[in-house]
Structure formats: C-alpha cells, structure tokens
Amino acid sequence: MVPLEKKWSSRARRIWWSRIRPGWLKIEWPLIWFLSLASLLLGYVGFREHYATVGDPHTVLDLIYFSLQLFLLESGSVSQPVPWQLEVARFLAPAVTIYTATKAFLRIFRDQLVVARLGFYRGHIVIAGLGRMGFLLTRTLRRSGRRVVVLERDEDNDNIERCREIGAPVLIGNATDRALLRKARTARASHLISVLGDDGANAEVAGRVRELVDHKRESALTCLIHIIEPQLRNLLTQRQLETIPESGFRLEFFNLFQLGALALLGLHPPFTKDISSNLSSPQLLIVGFGRMGQSLVTSVAAEWYDSHYESNGPLKITVVDRDVDKKLESLRFNHPQVTQFIHFVPRQIDVFSADFQRGDFLFDDERNCQVTNAYICLDNDAVGLYAGLSLLQQLKDQNVSVVVRMTYDGGLAALLREPVKESGFNRLHSFNLLDQTCTEQLLVSGMIESLAQAIHYDYVRHQHALGQTLQSNPSMAPWDELPESFRESNRLQVEHLKMKVTAVGCGITPVSHDHDGAVEFSAEEIEKLAEMEHERWKQDNLSRGWKPGGEQKDSEKKSHPLLVSWNELSTEHKELNRQTIRGIPDLLNRAGYRLYRR
C-alpha cells in the first residue's frame, strides 16, 4: 500500500504537470519579456521623475542605462524621494533576473543536480532503455509508489520529459557505461530492468552491473534482462539454472511474448482449467505464427496437458500463416513435446488473400464452424485489426470470440474500446501486449521470486496444520507484508536448491511434459539434503545476528532454540527438514520447473 504522504505528493505532482505546467509553459517567456519591458519602462520613468525632483536632470541614454542596471542590482539605490515607478522597477527587475538565472542554472547543471539527488536513493529500481516498454514500466512502478531511475541514450527521446513529469529522474548516456551505472546508484538498487531492444546490449548491461555489486550486501540486486527471442531466453534460463548463484547478485531473463501469452490466456481463456468440468472439445484458431503465436501455443499446450489431455486427447489448433510450414517445423524442433498434446491443422494463407476473406478454413464441408476461439497474433496492429474484422464477418452467426493482439492501449486499439450498436462486434477484443506485460508483476516473474513465494505458501500451510496462527507466528504473514529479511531468506533457500540438487546428481530445467517421469529422492539423498538445508538455515540466521538459546523463538532477543547442529535436533524437527526436501519436486513443478537426473 502506498503511504498517504506519497499519495498526496503524487497527486500534487500530477496536478502540476498535467494542469498547471502546460499553461505556464505557454505564457512563461512572453510573461518574462513583458515584465522585463515593464521594468525597463518603469525604471526609465522613475529615474526621470527622481532626477527632475532633485534638480539633477540626465540625458535619455543615461536614464536607459540606469534602468538596465536595475537588472544587475545596481543603480536603484537613490536618495529620497523615490517615485513609485522606480520603487516597483527596482524590485521587479532583479526578480526577473533571478528567475531567468535560476532557470539557466537548473538547465546547465540539471544532470549534476539529479546525481546529487540520487545520492539519497536506496532500494530503488533502475530501468535501462526508454522505449515504449521502458516508459510503461516506469509509469506503472511510479504509480505504485516506487522510486525509479531511468537510463536513456537518446537525449531527444520524447519520453524523457514524460518520465520527469511523473517524478522519475532520467540520466542521459549509454546504459553499458560503468560510470553511468554508478551515477544511478545501481549497486544500491533493488532491481535493474534492461529493455534496450537488443539482446546483446541487455546482456552487456547485466555484465556491467555484476561488476559493480557489493557481494556483502544484505539483499541481492535482481537484474531482469529482456531477451527478445523466446528460444534464446529459454536457453539462457537453462544455463542460469546450472550456475552456482553469486552472493549479492541475481540474474533473471524474461521474454515479452512469453509473458504476453500467459496474460492473454488469463484474460481470454480458450477453455476452463477445472479438470472436473464437462468440456466439449475446444478448437482454436491462431492467425500469425511468429513469436507471439508460438508462445501462445506452448502456453496453451501446458495448460491443456495439466487439465484436459488425459480425458480429451490432443487439442485441435488451426494455424494460419503465409510461412506456416517453416514455422511449424521450427516449433516442433524446439518444443517436440508440444506435438504430443496439440493436433495442428496448418493453413498457408496470406491475410490479404481471397482465401482468407472467404474463410473456408473456419468451416467443414457442411459449413459447420470448426473454431471456438480465435487469436490474431500478427506483428502489425493495422493488419491484425483487418484480420480480426474479416474473421468477424465470416463468423457473424457464430458465438466465437476473436482476440486481436495490439502493441499498446492506443492508436487502433482505442477503436475497439468504442461502444458499438451491432452486438456481433462485441465479440471482437483487443489484447494490448505492452500494457498487460509492463506491470509491477514483472518484478516477481522470475524463477527465484516465484519459488520463494511458493516456499512461503507451503510454510504457512504447514504452520496452519500445526495449529499456528498469525498472532502466534508473525512469519505466517502474507508475502507482501513480510519483512524484507524474511523474504530474502526464502530467496536464499531457492538459490541453495541448485547446490542441493547438484549434490545428489540432479539438475533443474523448465517443465517440458516429455514424460521422462518424476524424480524422487532416495532415503539417503533425503537425509543428506535435509542436513544441508538445516545447515544453510542455521548459517543464514547466525549471519543476521541470531544466536542459539531459549525454549522458543524470541524475535526481540534474536534467539532461536534450533540454531544447533543437525545431530542435536530432535527427531520431530529433523523430520520437518526431510519433509521440505520431499516437497522439492512438487514445488518446482508448480512453478514451471522440474528435476532431472544428470
């Protein structure tokens, strides 16, 4: 929850930037010129009246010179009497000078002032890249009350001013530059998100950040790297799963299209996930089989396998694309398990062709509709909207939902928000990819964060079964309300998973549903890993200032009776550690990963 003072600050900032500032910018310099001219005229008249009164007349040039000197805080100090015109001028002229000098100073030293301000930042979020994706992330995080620092190379980027409007300082320069990363106080940030639009540049940013991080910091910096190619993201994630974690630094990879596919299925599901429901077999249509289309298929396949494959068999999906055969071949090579759960009906058709407009692929020989849900996943918004409207014409008598993937909530996507009189058009929906993926949820989309939350959920469930309550055990609080030290402890437990499974000859990989069978630990492996987990937990608590002692946990004195060696633990508490180890395969599976024997 955003604190009340931050809400008021945010509201005042929005009022200033959206209402007051635009109007002020229109009149600012005309007003300055008017006040400057008024000061000059009033000074001229005032000096003329004053010197005439004291019997010391001056030339016109002298009076103009004296008036100009008012802007430099000179010539205004004269003996009495002082005419009212001069009285006004000798305060108004310096005020104009001070205002313009301040504006010039702020513009010249703006970057230095921003850097000085960042000296007080800690636990903030650094975003590298200010394209549309970077700006939407910045806006979303600022609305949730988080501090954000943006790094952008192009000083003419229109989004720079928009970021400053919402209170996000922008540093101009190359995000791969160590000096710029230091200015952004990256080593003290909680997250860095790199969305530069180039996989190589994003990876280079991660390398530079790793060099800056203090490995003794209490909470690790999480570096979220956007990888445009889904297959490359999967390979990098696989490599990361095999890498021993570094203290103080976490690296996570994400892909816009894979996140978008999950969000799309959440908003417009093709079937219910309830296994017990009576399900008439759905038949999907996907138009456009690029990155988004293929990510959608793999996500649908996983959900279908988990909920309906056993009872219904393969899911039928019609794929329309002008290069459908090549793209299907690529999908089958990279995701061979998908072909076990999906029955593909390929249609090599261009969306601008007469074949697409006729829509014969939507019906069987008896003109019965073969589609229950349609998803348009074309890269071009205009072409996608055209394809969606064309399908809707062919499906006007059918109760089929048509979802068009749009880039963001604007432009052509705005047309689909307009109310329509004809009810058939209400079945045409837009899915705005960037708006649905550039959210605060991105911060917890990585493997470590999702598994850490799953561990906490299992812990709370187990404590409830033992009769514990939030009052008797504050560690059972919801994840978002836990102290950061508790959440970090869960993350460290996840990172230690890699070391534990490696110790018994296993590895972790993303779920592929390839029927290799679930891995089960032997009794000896369970005993070994349970002791490793207890030792990790003990050392983690000792490093945070806890000490052994007492009959029960005391948070105020930071004492805990279980901070002892494995052999000193009771049989009951040893069994709790064993139960944690037994639950590792299921825990990984629920988060989209699985164990395998090396």
Image: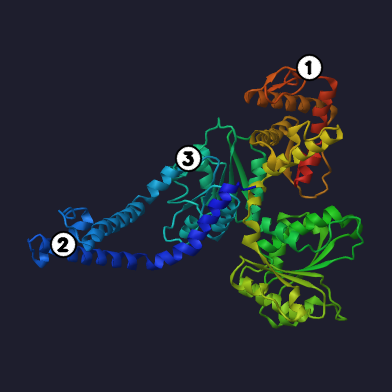
Residue 572 occupies quadrant: top right
Q: Which residue is mark 1?
A: 567
Q: CA distance from mark 1 to mark 3?
A: 47 Å
Residue 482 occupies quadrant: top right
Q: Is residue 460 above or below residue 354?
A: above
Q: Nearer the viewer, residue 461 or 318?
A: 461
Q: Is residue 428 left or right of residue 209?
A: right
Q: CA distance from mark 2 to mark 3?
A: 50 Å
Which x, y percent locates residue 364?
A: 85, 77
Would you call the spot at circle 1 few (<14 residues within 10 Å), some (14-19), or many (20 or more)? few
Residue at the image position 74 percent from the left and 57 percent from the top: 298
Q: Is residue 261 left or right of residue 84?
A: right
Q: Nearer the viewer, residue 495 or 151?
A: 151
Q: CA distance from mark 2 to mark 1?
A: 97 Å
Q: Secondary structure at mark 1?
A: helix
* Circles 2 and 3: CB atoms closer than 8 Å: no
Q: Earlier in the sequence, mark 2 or mark 1?
A: 2
Q: Which residue is mark 3?
A: 120
Which x, y percent locates residue 425?
A: 74, 77
Q: Nearer the viewer, residue 542 or 307?
A: 542
Q: Secondary structure at mark 2?
A: helix
Residue at the image position 79 percent from the left and 37 percent from the top: 460
Q: Earlier in the sequence, mark 1 or mark 3?
A: 3
Q: Is residue 360 above or below residue 560?
A: below
The three-letter amino acid code for the residue at tag 2 is Phe
Which x, y percent locates residue 247?
A: 59, 33
Q: Which mark is residue 47?
A: 2
Residue at the image position 75 percent from the left and 45 percent from the top: 591
Q: Is residue 596 left or right of residue 187?
A: right
